[in-house]
Image (cartoon, rainbow, N blue to C red):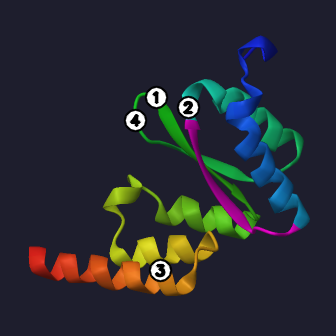
Amino acid sequence: MKVTEINPVELKVFLNHIYEYKKGVRQMVLYTTNKKYETFAVNRLKSQRIPFVIQPVDEERINLFFGKAECINAIRLMVTRPLNLLSPEEDFILGAMLGYDICAQCKRYCTRKARTRVAN
């Protein structure tokens, strides 16, 4: 990807996530972006030796998980389908790994679990 095609404003969040990861604020990050930034993002992560995995979202977007190797290894095993198809348990674990508010994750888990009981 040519540098002229990169919009720094659109990548500001990505670069901030890398900064926070390197400072130890985050152990793992999920960043959703346009596919046109994939090459830039991958090159940046590789150059900084940050483990990552890419998951397609749709024709235009990707989910980019990056962080500690043990977290990314778990993501490779757990996130084998679109995020909206994860079980309530997988969704809960993913949210916890991403550092989301644990009480909010508990509430989300209970809501999703209740929905799956009604559907069955």
Under mark 3, the amino acid is Gln
| Location of residue 11 (image quadrant) | top right
- Residue 75, above or below 33: below
Tell me the element at label 1: loop
Q: Which residues fall within the magenta stretch?
A: 24-33
The image position of residue 40, as x and y in percent, is 74, 29
User: Mark 1 and mark 3: span between their CA atoms?
Assistant: 28 Å
Pointer 1 or 3: first along the chain: 1
Front of the two marks 1 and 3:
3
For the question of whether residue 120 can be seen, the reply is: no
Residue at (35% x, 58% y) in the render: 84
User: Which percent across, then down, holds residue 55?
Assistant: 51, 45
Evaluate if marks 2 and 1 touch, with contact meaning CB atoms under 8 Å apart. Answer: yes
- Name above or below for residue 103 compared with residue 26: below
Distance from the alpha carbon under mark 2 to that under mark 4: 10 Å
- Residue for badge 2: 34
Q: Are marks 3 and 2 in contact (CB under 8 Å)?
A: no
Q: Quadrant of residue 83?
A: bottom left
The mark that comes first in sequence, 2 or 4, is 2
Q: Which mark is residue 60?
A: 1
